[in-house]
Image (tube, grey):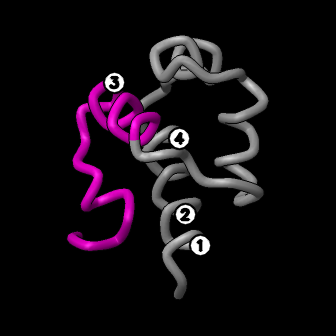
Amino acid sequence: MDTTTRFTQRFNEILKYSNVKQTALAKAANVSKQCISDYKAGKSVPSIDTLFLICRYLDISADYLLGLED
């Protein structure tokens, strides 16, 4: 499984179980709601700065989202 696919899978899993709204996450990550939708669909991946903000908001590690740890 490639990194983008792993990110997409784990990102969707975290959003599903955390009950975080896309709008709230987009605001916290300083991106549009469309960006969050694109991440969920695997159409794009966040920049390093955005990944940091997403991880901080969701209280998860970037290593987990990127598939470097379980």
Of the image marks 4 and 2, the number of the one nearer the N terminus: 2
Say which of 45 and 24 sits in front. 45
Amino acid under disc 3:
Tyr
In the rendered view, would you say 64 is above or below 4?
Answer: above
What is the spatial separation of the Cα atoms under label 2 and label 1, in whole angstroms? 6 Å
Of the image marks 3 and 2, the number of the one nearer the N terminus: 2
Amino acid under disc 1:
Thr
Q: What number is the disc on residue 9?
A: 2
Q: Are marks 2 and 1 in contact (CB under 8 Å)?
A: yes
Q: Quadrant of residue 38?
A: top right
Q: Are marks 3 and 1 in contact (CB under 8 Å)?
A: no
In the rendered view, would you say 17 is above or below 3?
Answer: above
Q: Are marks 3 and 2 in contact (CB under 8 Å)?
A: no
Say which of 37 and 31 sits in front. 31
Which residue in the structure is indicated by mark 1?
5
Q: Secondary structure at mark 4?
A: helix
Rate crowding at label 2 as few (under 14), some (14 to 19) or many (20 or more) other CA atoms within 10 Å: some
Residue 28 location (% of width, % of height): 46, 15
Q: What number is the disc on residue 16?
A: 4
Q: Foreground mark, 2 or 1?
A: 1
Of the image marks 1 and 4, the number of the one nearer the N terminus: 1
